[in-house]
């Protein structure tokens, strides 16, 4: 039989007029719900499901890669926002994308060991510690290539060089970097999640039915 799973239906309903402690508790609950949804996708796909990916495989998009734990905040905000993390006072916040169709190495997380050693994580390790992997797709023709983005964001040539060197060391290709200086509504983005083997589409704005996972579940109750 065929089953339909809606991401919004997985989330606890928001309650109005909460104090700060209740707001934090609700946010944790909603984040856990999203992580559970992501984990269930991997389980279903590996066990008995086929995911409906309605976008033509030849269509290449630029991707914003992130971890599952960030998905709930992105949905709550309703948009991908430019980041001002680690930027200088004269720089403008930017929203980063990559043309790498598998994974952007600079999106991998890092951790500090008990010995104080800074260690970069692999894609799989990032998935494990981040509650899954998520990517948001957007047409590259609507974004700025790295050379233009860095200039418009007022990133110094020295910093550009440093970012590129760091990217190469992580296995990235700076020529694949893209981005913009504006927020992009979630409704305008394709959303995919990584199940450990491949990316699965859970939202495609080109289709009329957003926020839908359609799976063929065998032996369903």
Image (tube, helix red, strand yellow):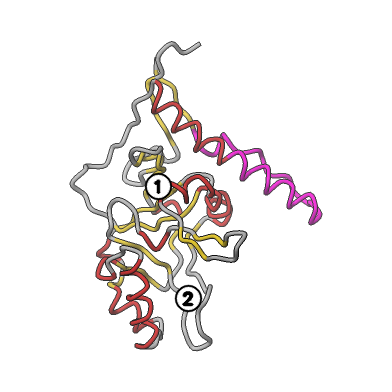
**Residue 107 occupies quadrant:** bottom left
Residue 21: x percent and y percent? 80, 53
Label located before the other in sequence (2 or 1): 2
Say left or right for 154 vs 72. left
**Closer-to-camera residue (11/171):** 171
Dot label at residue 191: 1
Asked whether the residues under the numbered discs 2 and 1 touch, taking CB atoms below 8 Å apart as contact, a structural biologist would say no
Residue found at the very far front of the displayed protein? 115
Q: Residue 198 in magenta?
A: no
Residue 89: x percent and y percent? 53, 87
> Which residue shows up at 31% across the image and 68% down it?
177
Magenta region's main secondary structure? helix
Residue 120: x percent and y percent? 46, 60
- Callout 2 secondary element: loop
Dot label at residue 93: 2
> Which residue shows up at 39% across the image and 63% down it?
106
**Residue 52 occupies quadrant:** top left
95 vs 138: above or below: below
Q: Quadrant of the N terminus?
A: top left
Which range of residues does the magenta coloring cover?
6-33
């Amino acid at each position: 039989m065929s089953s339909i799973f809606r991401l919004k239906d997985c989330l606890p309903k928001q309650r109005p007029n909460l104090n700060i402690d209740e707001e934090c508790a609700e946010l944790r609950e909603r984040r856990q719900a999203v992580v559970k949804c992501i984990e269930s996708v991997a389980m279903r796909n590996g066990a008995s499901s086929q995911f409906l990916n309605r976008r033509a495989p030849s269509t290449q998009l630029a991707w914003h890669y992130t971890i599952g734990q960030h998905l709930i905040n992105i949905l709550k905000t309703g948009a991908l926002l430019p980041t001002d993390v680690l930027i200088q006072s004269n720089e403008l916040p930017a929203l980063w994308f990559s043309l790498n169709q598998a994974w952007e190495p600079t999106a991998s997380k890092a951790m500090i060991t008990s010995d104080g050693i800074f260690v970069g994580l692999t894609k799989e390790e990032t998935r494990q510690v981040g509650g899954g992997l998520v990517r948001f797709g957007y047409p590259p023709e609507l974004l700025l290539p790295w050379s233009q983005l860095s200039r418009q964001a007022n990133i110094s040539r020295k910093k550009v060089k440093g970012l590129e060197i760091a990217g190469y060391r992580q296995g990235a290709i700076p020529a694949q970097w893209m981005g913009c200086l504006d927020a992009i509504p979630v409704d305008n983005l394709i959303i995919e999640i990584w199940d450990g083997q491949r990316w699965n589409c859970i939202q495609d704005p080109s289709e009329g039915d957003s926020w839908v996972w359609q799976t063929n579940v065998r032996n369903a109750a």
